[in-house]
Image (cartoon, helix red, strand yellow):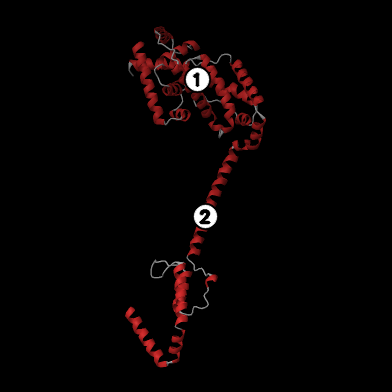
Amino acid sequence: MPQQILIQENIIENCRNGSLQDFRKLIELISPFAFSVAFRILADEEQAKDIVQETMITLWETIKKIKSPGSFMTWFYRIVVNKCYDQLRKRKRNPEFSADDGTWTLISNKMSENSNLEIENKETAMMIKILTNKLSPKQKAVFVLSDLEEMSNEEVALITGMSRINVKANLHYARKRIGEMIAKHI
Amino acid sequence: MTDEDKKYEQVLKMLRNSKPILTESDIVTEKIMRQLQEEKSKISIPELIFEYLFGWAYIGWVRRSMIAVVVVIVVLFGYQQALILRRINELSGQRIQHSSLIMTNMQDELLNKIQEYRVTGWKLPDGGKSVSEKEINELINSLNKLQVKYKDLFYLIENDPRLKKYVETRMNESNKTKH
């Protein structure tokens, strides 16, 4: 993983043995990563926080099933992505988003300012939402994990459960759609 | 790199740099911990017993060892079944002597052959035609009747060498023509 999280193996082992104290440490260590992925897939801060909570509860319930501490992060990201899929499916039933010209203006302005400048969560959410609006949940997940979280195709395949070819195909399609939208509006 | 690609890279760079920040992470952690505490206190006695009895199944090395043991047991079972089948085949190829079928009165060659048929599983040696027990019993009865009926005739033949020789010659000729 690009942002290697240093988790001592004994923390995971203690959590497997039911130590809530160590699980608290684990939450503090890994919840920002769950939030980052969930936020970028869902483009919604509150929903991303809910996903973090749900992920941690599921993690606590299933931590005993993890075969080895080495595969912990893959397992963890898989839970996050699956929770995001569920959320996106719910959202599909109640579509609420409509493209806004203001967001494109915002992206243009930010691009002309300085690309190294950090943007607030709210603005980032608006930008991601408008860019990934027409992507399927799988394409969103692959785009976020590959291009924003900078994971390798192999890691993305392990997390999403897709084959590497499928990951490449979804990523190609996602990049193409986003590129077209950028070309059209900026 | 085209202009479109440049724009795409620029947007991507902007999004990568703006890493989402989990605000109020303490509150989120507390919420999770509270929920876990509540769920832990909700665990019922049967669940606790189940966990105590079968919780070890979640331990990796125990699970792996059990899989290995199951594989060994299955292999042993298969091997034993193969041995048993081989033994059954060997036994079915052997002759089985039926003590209940010993016939003391049978001196005749035909009766010996009948006994042999019975011993070899009711199969005729010349190929596949089976004889039922009922048919054999009828054959034995009629043979016994014939022996009683022609007892005097046998006696006469036995005591007259000329007649005996004549009968033997005729029987030999008759057998030759049959073959």
Identify the residue at image location x=57%, y=29%: A62
Q: How many marks?
A: 2
* Badge 2: chain ID: B
Task: State the image coordinates of residue B4 (x, y, percent, origin top left).
Answer: 34, 16
Q: Is residue A101 above or below residue A164?
A: above
Closest to the camera, between mark 2 and mark 1, is 2
Nearest the camera: A148 or B63? Answer: B63
Nearest the camera: A156 or A151? Answer: A156
Task: State the image coordinates of residue B146 (x, y, percent, origin top left).
Answer: 44, 79
Q: CA distance from mark 2 to mark 1?
A: 56 Å
Q: Secondary structure at mark 2?
A: helix
Q: Is residue B158 above or below residue B57?
A: below
Disc marking residue A38: 1
Task: State the image coordinates of residue B112 (x, y, percent, origin top left).
Answer: 47, 76
In the picture, measured across the screen, residue B59 lies left or right of residue A94, that is right
Q: Residues within 10 Å of mark 2 (few under 14, many from 20)?
A: few
Residue B173 visible in rendering: yes
Q: Which residue is mark 2?
A: B81
Task: State the image coordinates of residue B115 (x, y, percent, origin top left).
Answer: 48, 73
Nearest the camera: B107 or A88? Answer: B107
* Badge 1: chain ID: A
Q: Residues within 10 Å of mark 1 (few under 14, many from 20)?
A: many
Quadrant of the image occupied by residue A68: top right
